[in-house]
Image (cartoon, grey):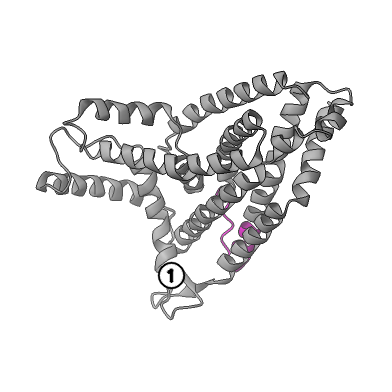
Amino acid sequence: MTAFLAMIGDTWRLSRKQVVFIILLVLLTLLAGFMIAVVKVNTTDDGELVLGDIFSDRPENRLAASQWYQGYRLVNRLGQERPPEGVKFDSPEWDEYQERVKARRKETTDNLAPPSRLERSVVGWHYFTQSIMVVIAMWLFIAAAAGYFPGLMEAGAIDVVLSKPMGRLKIFAGRFVGGLVFLGGAVLLFQLIMYVGLGLRTGIWYGGAFASITPIMFTAALLYSVVAFLGILSRSAVFALTVGYFLYIAVDSGLKIFSQVQLMGELEDYPFFDNLAIWLREWIPNFSTLQELSTASVLAIPDFDWRPFYIGGLWLAASLSAGFFIFKRRDF
């Protein structure tokens, strides 16, 4: 156990020296400070407290006021099945279908939304801010994580590690867990700043803002497992970084668009592609979907869709198993 913790500590020390993690900490701190500083509590003519901002004379910040509803609609859409058979996009039947969906969502959100306008806006502001934070964190985490295992496997570096009484499983697990420690610390620090800052600024202390930590870290772990596998396979941080970004940006976006086209019923005349889109949505994890669900978890929505996380868990286990299999058989 001591050796395993030492490996985590070694990765932690490596993380602190990386410029990308320093940039990450600075950006997240600046983001939290800015999002806290720009809002203020105003009182309407009716005497109701609302969340405003320092840039406008309007009592209520429209962006903050709408974020709770937008977050709920997004999550509701992510779990939405395709329209009734035969209903085509941009047809009169499609417009009627959309109106029914909107009416049903409005009825549901009105019952679930926090009771006061101020509280609803503060919760929405937490959600909106975290949706920005998680994109910044994942982009920079890929850059940092790409070099962890290739750097460990370099001649000299691995010799020092293997000279200690430590098995390769502990080395592998310690490097993986250690790579997540710094990101977890940065995310937690960001959320603490937002919680305290908005609490002092508005009087609304919303503990539900911390609900996103676990799904965010799960998404980061899945992303890290893929990048780590690429790094172990190639022994190249550049290869892991390049392919990791390609998968995260191009392939991930393409799969999401393909899935949305299928949900709109546009592939009904092409059974092969229609079934392919369904299969990909069911069995291939989508990072952008996981990020959207992670940040929406702060809204305390009861019909939260956990299915993408179950699929992601299978891929996380597969990526780690494949990565360790290759790592164990490498000559060092």
In front here: 276 or 53?
276
Whether residue 291 is visible: yes
Give the residue furthest to the left. Answer: 92
162 with respect to 238 (left or right): right
Instruction: Decide which of 272, 75 is in the foreground and name it.
Output: 272
**What stretch of residues is rendered in magenta?**
193-208
The magenta stretch spans residue 206:
yes
Image quarter of the N terminus: top right
Q: In the depicted view, which residue is nearer to us: 127 or 120?
A: 127
Image location of residue 2, percent across then percent down: 86, 28
Q: State the residue at coordinates (21%, 34%).
A: 267
Q: Position of residue 305 (x, y in %)?
A: 42, 35
Q: Can you identify the residue that label 1 sits on? A: 61
Taking the view exactly as shown, the residue that stands out farthest to the bottom is 57
Residue 83 falls left or right of residue 122: left
**Location of residue 288 by image quarter:** top left
Q: Is residue 217 visible?
A: no
